[in-house]
Image: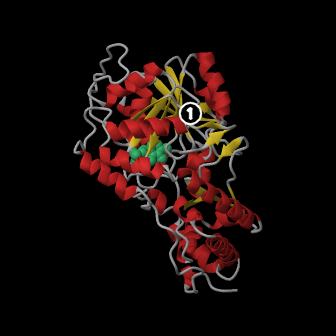
């Protein structure tokens, strides 16, 4: 058996995979159109390109109204406030998340109530909603982790019963569909991001969509210094007046990129099917398949899950070994309640787990999955060829065999010093 590249062997792959983001047909023309139009900013809001993109993107996601903005982080804050969140209230939200959905809650002067992950779906644990509830709860903000859709029905039922809002954070799930219905259209509002890593990107950018005119109207006010256009209904005045408008260049580029979303989605689906099947042949690893009822999976990341034998040695060693074989793997999200860069001190988190209910001291499922089990592959490489998928599977098999075989001693030795280096790093 070959030595792993991490320990001096020859790597499986020495050529690169497709890069992301990538420019394509029509992008230059779109940017030129915005340049020559001479009105480059978001004012007057919505400007021409932003209005055109918002209409197309909202329609693609079964939403009546859409507002472009500068970042997904602002989309998090604005979607929650527009849906009715007020200072002092609570938001039920999963810990397996990017940090901004949580910091956006605290920026609103509200408190995140952070729930654990379902051990079967690896998504927000919907059996914990009732336990998370208090008389301060304003709503639920789900997150479609890596593009896998959180089943909307139990959340909607819960929100209706307790008169709460439901906001989807769809920053990782552009174009996804559940029983044929698009993400973003399930609740009161949805937040999207167009930051560089996302499936649809202009480098930066955010979006709030809704089927509720009042919510959309409030989101407009928050994006544009309390101005309310084009759907003025009633005077709303948010104290945190802001300009979060999107530049016309970003909107024009997004319109062009949107024309390729479906085609790229189809390539990703074909390749991910292959990769799921290849990995199913390899012992001690598996991969997260789309959730049942997901008619169009989005795949922002492809998630490899390590079995006990490999997780027991070290996810860190597996990750480093896979990267050394030439596969651009990533560590994935650090749970927000143990993230080194979140704003709350450890004692201030309100946590909810199956074992301890509300007031839990830890969230065992997400802490285990994130720090020991999940390894990500970025979506750019899923736009590659069948041979690319084969190489990924060959590298995964080699790393598995090496860690448990010829390189088991070195792996165990390395695990003592590298365990969780990524997870304690401020770069995550
Ligand atoms: C789930 C989620 N929400 C919000 C954001 C924030 O988006 P942005 O980086 O555009 O501010 C991101 C990603 O960056 C994300 O993954």
Among the 4 quarters of the image, the one containing residue 305: bottom right
- What's the coloring here? secondary structure
Tell me what residue is drawn at x 53 percent, y 81 percent: 14
Residue linked to disc 1? 62
Among the 4 quarters of the image, the one containing residue 264: bottom right
Residue reaching furthest to the left = 38
Residue reaching furthest to the top = 234
Depth check, front residue: 351 or 288: 288
Depth check, front residue: 285 or 181: 181
Q: Position of residue 131 (x, y in %)?
A: 62, 26
In the picture provided, is 186 more to the left or to the right than 70? right
Tell me what residue is drawn at x 46 percent, y 62 percent: 20
Depth check, front residue: 9 or 73: 73
Depth check, front residue: 287 or 21: 21
Query: Local crowd at mark 1 within 10 Å, few (<14), some, or many (≥20)?
Result: some
In the picture provided, is 414 more to the left or to the right than 386? left
Q: In this view, does 333 lie above or below 47?
A: below
Tell me what residue is drawn at x 68 percent, y 43 percent: 294
Q: Is residue 179 visible?
A: yes
Q: Where is residue 251 in the image (x, y as percent from the top left)?
A: 36, 45
Q: Quadrant of ligand 1?
A: top left
Q: Can residue 103 be seen in this view?
A: no
Mark 1 lies on a secondary structure that is loop
Tell me what residue is drawn at x 42 percent, y 61 percent: 23
Q: In this view, does 157 lie above or below 408?
A: above
**Quadrant placement of the C terminus:** bottom left
Q: Is residue 226 above or below residue 144?
A: above
Among the 4 quarters of the image, the one containing residue 314: bottom right
């Amino acid at each position: 058996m070959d030595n792993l590249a991490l320990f001096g062997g020859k790597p499986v792959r020495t050529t690169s995979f497709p890069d992301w983001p990538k420019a394509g047909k029509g992008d230059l023309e779109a940017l030129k159109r915005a340049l020559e139009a001479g009105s480059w900013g978001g004012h007057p809001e919505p400007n021409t390109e932003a209005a055109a993109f918002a209409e197309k993107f909202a329609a693609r996601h079964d939403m009546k109204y859409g507002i472009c903005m500068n970042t997904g982080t602002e989309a998090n804050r604005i979607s929650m406030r527009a849906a009715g969140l007020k200072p002092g209230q609570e938001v039920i939200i999963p810990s397996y998340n990017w940090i901004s959905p949580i910091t956006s809650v605290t920026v609103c002067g509200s408190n995140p109530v952070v729930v654990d992950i379902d051990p079967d779906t690896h998504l927000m644990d919907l059996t914990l909603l009732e336990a998370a509830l208090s008389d301060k709860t304003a709503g639920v903000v789900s997150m479609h982790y890596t593009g896998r859709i959180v089943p909307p029905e139990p959340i909607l039922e819960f929100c209706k019963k307790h008169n709460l809002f439901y906001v989807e954070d769809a920053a990782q799930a552009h174009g996804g569909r559940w029983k044929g219905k698009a993400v973003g259209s399930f609740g009161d509002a949805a937040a999207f991001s167009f930051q560089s890593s996302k499936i649809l990107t202009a480098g930066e950018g955010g979006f709030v969509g809704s089927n509720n005119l009042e919510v959309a109207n409030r989101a407009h006010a928050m994006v544009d210094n309390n101005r309310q256009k084009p759907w003025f209904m009633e005077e709303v005045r948010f104290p945190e007046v802001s300009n979060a408008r999107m530049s016309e260049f970003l909107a024009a580029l997004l319109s062009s990129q949107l024309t390729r979303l479906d085609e790229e989605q189809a390539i990703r689906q074909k390749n991910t099917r292959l990769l799921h099947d290849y990995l199913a042949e390899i012992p001690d690893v598996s991969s997260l398949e789309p959730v049942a009822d997901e008619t169009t999976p989005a795949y922002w990341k492809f998630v490899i899950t390590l079995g006990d034998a490999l997780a027991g040695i070290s996810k860190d060693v597996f990750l480093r070994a896979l990267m050394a074989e030439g596969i651009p793997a990533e560590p994935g999200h650090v749970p927000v309640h143990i993230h080194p860069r979140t704003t709350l001190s450890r004692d201030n988190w309100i946590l909810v787990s199956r074992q301890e209910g509300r007031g839990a001291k830890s969230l065992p499922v997400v802490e285990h999955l994130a720090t020991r089990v999940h390894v990500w592959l970025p979506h750019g490489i899923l736009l590659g060829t069948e041979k690319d998928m084969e190489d990924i599977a060959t590298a995964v098999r080699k790393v598995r065999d090496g860690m448990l075989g010829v390189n088991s001693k070195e792996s165990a030795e390395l695990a003592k010093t590298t365990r969780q280096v990524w997870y304690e790093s401020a770069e995550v």
